[in-house]
Image: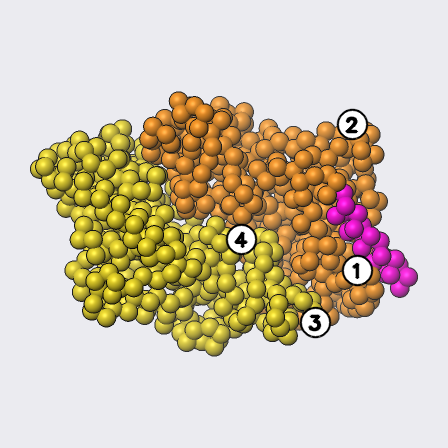
Chain colours: A yellow, B orange
Amino acid sequence: MATVPERFTGLIGQSVRAIDTPALVVDLDAMEQNLQRMARFVRERGLRLRPHAKMHKSAELARLQIAHGAVGVCVQKVGEALALARAGIGDILITNEVIAPAKLRRLAEAARELPTHFGLAVDSAEGLDAVIAAVERAGLPGQGTLDVLVEIDVGQGRCGVAPGAAAVPLAQRIATAPGLRWAGLQAYHGGAQHRRSPDERREAIAAAAAAVHQTRDALTAAGLPPPAVTGAGTGSFLHEAVSGLWTELQAGSYLFMDADYARNAPDDPGALGLTHGFDLTFDHALYLQAQVISRSPDRAVIDAGHKSHALDSGPPVVAHPAGLRWSNGGDEHGVLHGDADPGSLPALGEPVWLIPGHCDPTVNLHDWLIGVRGGVPDGHVERLIHVNARGAVD
Amino acid sequence: MATVPERFTGLIGQSVRAIDTPALVVDLDAMEQNLQRMARFVRERGLRLRPHAKMHKSAELARLQIAHGAVGVCVQKVGEALALARAGIGDILITNEVIAPAKLRRLAEAARELPTHFGLAVDSAEGLDAVIAAVERAGLPGQGTLDVLVEIDVGQGRCGVAPGAAAVPLAQRIATAPGLRWAGLQAYHGGAQHRRSPDERREAIAAAAAAVHQTRDALTAAGLPPPAVTGAGTGSFLHEAVSGLWTELQAGSYLFMDADYARNAPDDPGALGLTHGFDLTFDHALYLQAQVISRSPDRAVIDAGHKSHALDSGPPVVAHPAGLRWSNGGDEHGVLHGDADPGSLPALGEPVWLIPGHCDPTVNLHDWLIGVRGGVPDGHVERLIHVNARGAVD
């Protein structure tokens, strides 16, 4: 078990206001509601949910998702996969290419020695050669298998082969290589998650669906229909879900949400033909708790800057007290302004809660999440959640 | 001793190309040259150097700076101070306000129990009350002292009392409180570091100097002349140095540099009256090493995104291979473009070295730095450097 740092010991049962700052606080009530809403949706739609654990990097939260019906989790890196597997997660897909022989050795050895079932993506013959070599060297054939998916570029312009026939020779090689299992297509459009209007997201995922369709047809014609098509994120998953092409959703941020996702105009489930009355509103469940360490008549300076919350997807929002404007104070400070009412600025020593701009890289800055019952600012600490794969960029 | 992760074991003596990616690589030759250039400058100018260790967060690098004449180091947080003190650093100034009683207790107890000499800044009567209470409770008076500085706002609009008379009652209280030592003024203008032209930086530091002058006069008139005036960063330190007001410089980034500091037009030491022929060119010494994990005709995708290097101060620069343009590929990817010559794109599996946009928050994403002799791409690994205070935001 990871050691709880001194500053977080003895917190269980205490008021949220007693938390040493800066600290990431999870509103457990909001998180559980998000968990249940997504679980009901995929269950009733007959879809598999494999949430992306790159967001929370926590075995405890992965277990909670699996207990609510998820088939396993996704990660981006071998290091994340190993951290979660060693903490007992049984089904982990690396939705990314792995090229380095040393990384593939670590993965293949883990697949041999741990009870976890692993998968990964490929998008090149050389990359697949490296996977096959590592699997053989680890003696995996006969002792287990590794799922291998072909990633296709469905519009993001990052990794993946071109849609269509390019996937076929890779799938043929996967299907015949000892120790590998032909697992299907990785088809994720990251850019579509953050397009602000439902129409823009619909168009992006329609193009992605055309790419999946074309590739699935080419594979089926070659006798290798993809057993799964996996992808979709929190911003666009309704569109993938209604397409009839994706069999598995990878949304991860729905659990916590963030200020950037809140800037998306929501989809209308009815307009997508979802008439079952699903409530797919996901509430903010992640807060950065900070403390005012300096006050002037026109500003309150808090003890948290971008070493405590990521800025890559825009600024955080001040959740409590309400009505304050945030400005960047550097690595370790934020500056709060009460433009309309300077009297609303919190006093020296008072706690403040921010909604981070982007949950994934924010969680990666912290080793522990503080689970709170009853929300902020009035709840109490229920449990500490370890971020097992914090910093596992390898 | 911190445990070296498996992926970095056995690296000593190996080629830099053997490093498991992503990894932060320090060019030791460049770093040592930066160290020596700054050391010579402060020595010949009769200034004290107290480099800001918020940048490297490493006891080994702090020791190296002290061995080259630094009087100690600065940090921003109690957590950083404790991590470095426990690793043997003997003189640590927290250039920031600390309000929380639990943090002040940890600091005061460390000041009692460790041989390290600590200091911190205050900018309010309530904050100073909290410091005095913690020092009394820890029984520090008689067993040691804590340096306390008054921070003044010299133009950044963040923490600090207004210049002039506001510092006097705080200094009076510090000077008479048992266990505290009146240590002088904290006067740092963070915003001035990143103004691009020497003229803009000269103007900003001239205004800061006027604020220091006014405050020093008020304190001197009250019989409490500041024993030290400490501040200045890598972007502006020449201006503070020639002002005759600052006695101690806090520059930290000079050791590694980054892409953002490289965007500053350099100062002309001669124009500032520095006629001794100082070479104050600081070279890039910090690289993020990544690997190409996906190739298309028009792009190379690397295995490092903003979970490996901070984006708060702008994009990274591709140092090697030269001539490539970087674009954001998300948390765990970067996309390289060979606009003029796609043939210059590195092959699948090849290493790539980026100069991070901002060194401080980039280092904070990593637990280890890989010290390389002979530079990139052809040097070899000489030693591993632990980032003792990684994540110590408290």
> Foreground: A236 or B120?
A236
- Rendered location of residue B135, percent (x, y): 69, 67
Vertical order, A327 against B30 (above or below): below
- Residue under label 3, please give it: B126
Q: Name the mark on residue B163.
A: 1
- Residue under label 2, please give it: B277
Q: Is residue B220 magenta?
A: yes
Q: Is residue B51 magenta?
A: no
Query: Magenta segment, which residues?
Result: B201-225
Residue name at image x 25 percent, y 68 percent: A278
Residues tagged by mark 1 and mark 2 found on one chain of the structure: yes
Quarter of the figure with the C terminus of chain B = bottom right
In this rendering, position of residue A196 left or right of residue A208? right
Q: Residue B184: which quarter of the image?
A: bottom right
Residue name at image x 58 percent, y 38 percent: B258
Q: Name the mark on residue A300.
A: none
Query: Mark 4 packing: few (<14 Cα in 10 Å), some, or many (20+)?
Result: many
**1 vs 2, front mark:** 1
The dominant secondary structure in magenta is: helix
Residue name at image x 77 percent, y 33 percent: B269
Q: Residue A49: which quarter of the image?
A: bottom left
Residues tagged by mark 4 and mark 3 found on one chain of the structure: no
Give amino acid for label 4.
Answer: Lys
- Rendered location of residue A308, percent (x, y): 51, 56
Q: Name the mark on residue A307.
A: 4
